[in-house]
Amino acid sequence: MPTSHNRRQTIKTVVHGAGLYWLALAAASVSAQSDTPAWRRIENQARGQTVYFNAWGGAPTINAYIAWAGEQVLQRFGVTVVHVKIGDAADMVKRVRNEIRAGKSDGSVDLAWINGENFLTLKREALLFGPFAESLPAYAKVDTLGKPTTRIDFSEPVDGMEAPWGMAQLTFMVDRQRVATPPASLDDLLAFATKHPGRMSYPRPPDFHGTTFLKQMLLDLQEPAQRAALYQSVTTQAFARTTAPLWRTLDALHPHLWRAGKQFPHTAAAIRQMMADGELLLAMTFNPNEAANEIAAKRLPVTTVSFQFSSGTIGNSHFLGIPLNASAPQGAQVVANFLLGAEAQGRKADIAVWGDPTVLALDRLSGPEKAFFPSRLLPGQLGRSAPVLAEPHASWVDPLEKEWIRRYGT
C-alpha cells in the first residue's frame, strides 16, 4: 500500500505528467482477490483510521443507514466513519481536484458516493485511487453479468476505479384500481396516453427523471442495430439523425398529456403526488422499490403496483470511489468492502431501512447470506426486473435537454 510520501509523489505525477501517473498507480493497486494475507494486511493498516465518507445527506433513511454501517465498521474493524453530508457530488469533485492540484496528499475525502459525470471527471482527470474494486473480497459475488452497469458507468468502463454499491432502473407505477393493465412497452404507453387524455405526464427536463424518460424513448425508437451511436460521443450528424423519431413521437404525444403538453411537472415526486391524488394515472421513478416505500409511508394506496417495459428500461449503478489523495485509503477499502457484503446489502435492500436494490447475485450467496435479504415481496415492490438497458453516453445529455427546451420549454 502507498505511504503518505508515495502518495505525494503520485499526486505530483498527476499534476506534472499523466503518463507517469499510470505507472505509479499500478504500483499502488491492491492485489487481494479474497480473504488473503494481502487483504488482512489492509485491514490491519486500516485499524485506527478515520474515513471521511462524502455522501448525499438529503434523506433521513439513508443517513440512518450510513450511521448503522459506521457503527458496525468501528466495532468490527476499528475504523471510524464520518459521514460528510453533501448536497451535490460535483462540489466534492471540485474540492478533490483543487486539493490534488495544490499538492495536498492527505485529502479531506476518503470515500465518495459517485457515478455518471462525476465519476467520468474524476477518472479522466486521474483523480482516483485504484484500481481497487475488484480486489475487494466481497466483489466476488457482484452480479456483473446480470447487472452489467456494475462495470459500465454511463457508458464509461469502470476499470475497477469505483466499487458498485446499489442499483437503479427506470420503473413506472400505477394504481391497479384505476389502471387494470399497465402498459408493457413504449407503444403501449403511447396508446395509454391517447386513451386517457390529460392523465399522464413526465418531469420537465433537465430534471433527471424527465431526461431519463427521453433517453428511454430514444432507445426504444431505434432498431437495436442503430443504438450503437448512442453509446459513442455525440456528433451533430448523429444527434440530428438519431433524435428525429423522438421529436416526431413527442409532437404526437404531447397534445394528449396533462395540460396538453404545454406545461410539465418539475419533478417525479410531484407526478407521484398527482397520481396519489387521482389527477394522473401513471408515475415514474428510478428506484424499483419506491412504490413500496411510499405505500409503507401511507403516501400511496396499497393497490399501487410497479412495472417496467418488458423489453427493458434504462438502469445504472451507483458507486463508491476513493480519491487519489485519500488520507485513509486502507480504511476506505475496508468500509467499501463492508458496504458491498451481503449483510450490508441486504439491510440496504430492506424497504423498512432504505429499499435500495442490491448489486449482488442472490443465487451466488450462501444460505446465511441470503437470510440477510427480505424473504417476501411487499405491496408495490417490483416482482421481477426487466432487462437493464445501459445509459447512453453522457455527452448526449446536454444537447438532448437543450433541444427539448428549445422545442417545448416555453
Image (cartoon, rainbow, N blue to C red):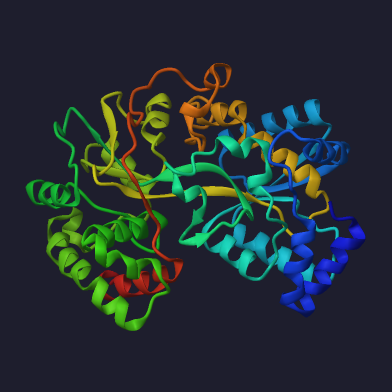
* Left or right: where 85 falls relative to 280: right
Residue at point 60% right, 67% down? 121
Q: Residue at x 75, y 54 (%)?
A: 29
Give the residue displayed 69% in from the left and 60% down from the top. Answer: 128
Query: Which residue appears farthest toward the left when viewing the image?
Result: 195
* Residue 33: image location, x then y, percent: 68, 41
Note whether residue 63 is visible.
Answer: no
Left or right of 143: which side holds 327? right
Front-most of 396 and 54? 396
Residue for point 58% across, 17% down: 368
127 is higher (above) or lower (below) than 158:
below
- Above or below, 324 against 19 in this view is above
Above or below, 371 against 248 in this view is: above
State which quadrant residue 237 falls in: bottom left
Residue 376 in view of the camera: yes
Could you tell me how many numbered marks the image carries? 0
Q: Percent position (x, y) of residue 28?
A: 79, 57
Residue 333 occupies quadrant: top right
Whether 399 is drawn above or below 171: the answer is: below
